[in-house]
Amino acid sequence: MARRGIMSNELKEEIAKELGFYDTVQKEGWGGIKARDAGNMVKRAIQIAEESMKKGRP
């Protein structure tokens, strides 16, 4: 059974651009990013979700 991502590709790309490692994603794919960058990406996604919930958005 294939794993399905929770974050959309658009959101992942937006966060990668914001955090400054999108060039690595373009060159090497998502497997080329560092574990620290992946962790920071998850932290940022959680922040975005929390902000969205505070504003009453799904």
Image (cartoon, helix red, strand yellow):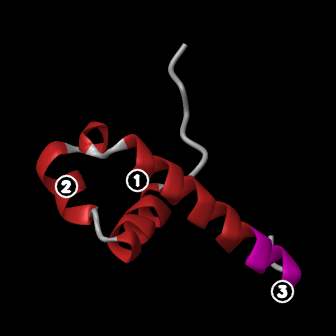
Q: Position of residue 44 (x, y in %)?
A: 58, 66
Three-letter code for the amino acid on which mark 1 is drawn: Asp
Circles 3 and 2 in contact, beta carbons < 8 Å? no
Q: Residues within 10 Å of mark 3 (few under 14, many from 20)?
A: few
- Decide which of tag 3 and tag 2 comes sooner along the chain: 2
On screen, residue 7 above or below 4 = below
Residue positioned most to the front:
36
Q: Residues within 10 Å of mark 1 (few under 14, many from 20)?
A: some
Residue at mark 2:
24
Secondary structure of the residue carrying numbered label 3: loop
- Distance in Å between CA atoms under marks 2 and 1: 11 Å
Question: What secondary structure do most residues of the magenta stretch adopt?
Answer: helix
In this rendering, the label closer to the viewer, 3 or 2: 2
Which quadrant, please, contains the C terminus? bottom right
Q: Residues within 10 Å of mark 2 (few under 14, many from 20)?
A: some
- Distance in Å between CA atoms under marks 3 and 1: 27 Å
Residue at mark 1:
37
Circles 2 and 1 in contact, beta carbons < 8 Å? yes
- Decide which of tag 2 and tag 1 comes sooner along the chain: 2
**58 horizontally vs 11: left or right:** right
Three-letter code for the amino acid on which mark 2 is drawn: Thr
Q: Position of residue 6 (x, y in %)?
A: 61, 45
Q: Is residue 19 magenta?
A: no
Residue at image position (55%, 33%) is 4
Residue at mark 3:
55
Circles 3 and 1 in contact, beta carbons < 8 Å? no
Which quadrant, please, contains the N terminus? top right
Which span of residues is magenta-colored? 50-55
On screen, residue 51 above or below 26 = below
